[in-house]
Amino acid sequence: MRLLVLDDSPLLAWTVARLSPAGTVVTGARSLDEAIRLLEEAAPDAVVVSVPPATLPWPGFQQLCASRHPPVPVLYLSCLFESTTEAGFDPKAGKLELLRKPVEKVEFEAALGRLFAAAREARSGIG
């Protein structure tokens, strides 16, 4: 499984790597532009995004992930938004989930499990 983690700090990528199943390859992107470039070069199986700042075009990023073949599911982490609707996401814009920061380890691990399951489902053509 290949996972892209978008955050301006390497800490989230480090944390995700430690909570992911063995064999998961985690690549960090420090900016939205870098993440878009990586998505377009070789789309990962799934993406984890730390949302700030709110002024970036997150719904457009989600559309890009959803337009890949297979679609790339995304887990967003935010201290700004309570829901995907509040963040401006189209409910039909692919597989996405939003967790409100701070998030407990158990909740984050469960969300990563759902993200990996969604990625496996997308790769198999189910759903």
Image (cartoon, rainbow, N blue to C red):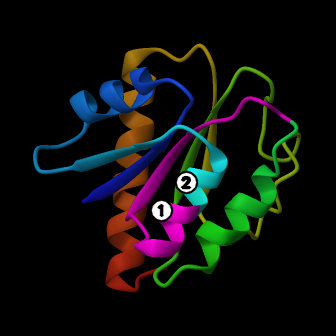
How many marks the image carries: the answer is 2
* Quadrant containing the N terminus in the rendered view: bottom left
User: For the magenta stretch, what is the residue range?
Assistant: 37-54
What x and y, as percent, mark residue 43? 44, 70
Vertical position of residue 86 compared to residue 118: above or below: above
What x and y, as percent, mark residue 21? 17, 43
Q: Residue at x 36, y 52 (%)?
A: 3
Quadrant of residue 122 within the rendered picture: bottom left
Q: Residues within 10 Å of mark 2 (few under 14, many from 20)?
A: many
Vertical position of residue 56 compared to residue 36: above or below: above
Q: Is residue 45 magenta?
A: yes
* Amino acid beneath label 2: Ala
Vertical position of residue 27 compared to residue 63: above or below: above
Secondary structure beneath disc 2? helix
From the viewer's perspective, tell me whether residue 97 is left or right of residue 121. Answer: right
Q: Which mark is residue 35?
A: 2
Q: Is residue 47 magenta?
A: yes
From the viewer's perspective, tell me whether residue 95 is left or right of residue 82. Answer: left
Secondary structure beneath disc 1? helix
Q: Which mark is residue 84?
A: none
What x and y, as percent, mark residue 14? 31, 27
* Amino acid beneath label 1: Leu
Task: Assess whether mark 1 and mark 2 are in contact (beta carbons under 8 angstroms).
Answer: yes
